Image (cartoon, rainbow, N blue to C red):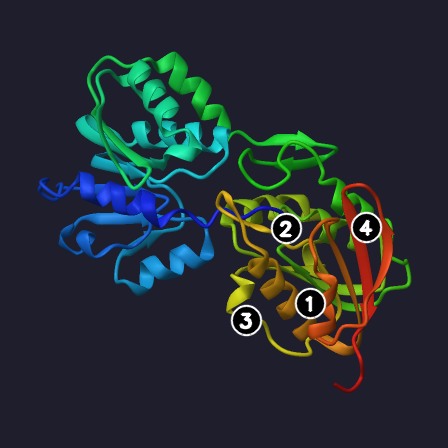
Amino acid sequence: MGNINHGDDSALETLVMSLRDQEPPSSALFIGAMPHEAFKAWRYLIGWQPHRAHATAWENAGFKRVDHLPEKKFSCVMVLPGKSKEATFASFANAIDRLEIGGQLIVAMTNAAGASRYEKEIAKVMGQVQSFQKNKCRAFSVRLGAEVRRDIIDDWRLGNVVREIDGFLVLPGIFSSKQIDAGSRALVSHFPAGLRGTAADIGAGWGYLSHSLLERCSQISKVDLFEVDATALECAHINLTNFSRRVSFHWHDVCEGLPANQYDVVMINPPFHAGQALDLSLGRRMIEQSIQTLKPGGTWFAVANRQLPYEKWLDHCGMPARKLSEDGTYKCFTGIKPLTR
């Protein structure tokens, strides 16, 4: 659902280059962890990564991963922030809270993401910052002293605070964290009350489509939510508490595949960005998987931005979809998967 931040390899490379003359620390935490050969020498490094694909890559590279940020102090905390301003400042607060006095904070970001501005904000809170620039990115580091601007850090920490939107609870930084996505609202208005059987919510976000389907369609026996962002999925758990017996949650990158011919109903609001860049291949892959996991004769629902050329891709996937509605921003589709292909 919505935009997914896949991170930036150039920021990671810049971070590593800034560390090339530095000895491995006695303990280290990596917020937004992405693997690199240079970290093989860091014996006491653990990583936190909410994006399923990056978390898998981190583990496959042999590094230790934690599901939740540990409540302990480290001699070094590295940060590769997401693209949301609130989430970025929240990650800074989380990092500083986990630094021992004299410990080193290291942040790497692309220039396009506002690295220079964020560096100045860190300097305002912690003092003099050392900066390294390469690959159109900036890595900046600073040691934690006894005196920091705790008032500003407290404001940054608000990015970790749950907020309410029309009765739903969400965290800043995830997709549609300030208002219910208008495309999703448009799509749920087309759910007929008579839908029945099992359903899949592909890229489920914080659970709006699943909640609407379960509320409207009493004959839906179960909804499986598939979401790549662990933070969004935690919100979905909360928002679907009233339907706990009819839902199942999967922290999963659907681009890695889904079981074939599994569901009677499938719904999707596919993303179209990877980080800062437009990436139609991401949406196409998710659409392909959403159609594959639908049973023959099952019903498929999707919403997309109006300008995205997904119609030809639906033909390629063998889904005879029809347009339910279209406005200046969004278009909604439905289709019945053919019994034979």
Mark 2 Cα shell of 10 Å, populated few (<14), some (14-19), many (≥20): many
User: Which comes sooner in the sequence, label 4 or label 2?
Assistant: 2
User: Vertical placement of 126 versus 54: above or below?
Assistant: above
Pointers 1 and 4 in contact (CB under 8 A)?
no
Name the residue type under label 1.
Trp
Horizontal and vertical percent position of residue 280: 59, 57
Q: Which residue is mark 3?
A: 257
Residue 277: x and y in percent read 51, 46
Q: Could you tell me the amino acid type at mark 4?
A: Val
Q: Which residue is mark 1?
A: 313
Question: In which quadrant of the rendered image does the C terminus lie?
Answer: bottom right
Q: Nearer the viewer, residue 8 or 222?
A: 8
Looking at the image, tell me whether mark 3 or mark 1 is earlier in sequence order: 3
Can see residue 163? Answer: yes
Number of on-image labels: 4
Q: Quick check: 202 left or right of 22?
A: right
Judged left or right of residue 215, residue 145 is left
x 29%, y 55%: residue? 35
- Residue annotated with mark 2: 1
Q: Which mark is residue 188?
A: 4
Between discs 3 and 4, the one toward the N terminus: 4
Type of amino acid under label 2: Met
Q: Secondary structure at mark 3?
A: loop
Instruction: Judge from the rendering whether residue 121 lies leftward or rightward of residue 269; answer left or right.
Output: left
Classify residue 323 as left or right of residue 183. Answer: right
Residue count near mark 1 (Cα–Cα under 10 Å), binned few <14, some 14–19, many ≥20: some
Question: Who is closer to the viewer here, 88 or 21?
Answer: 21
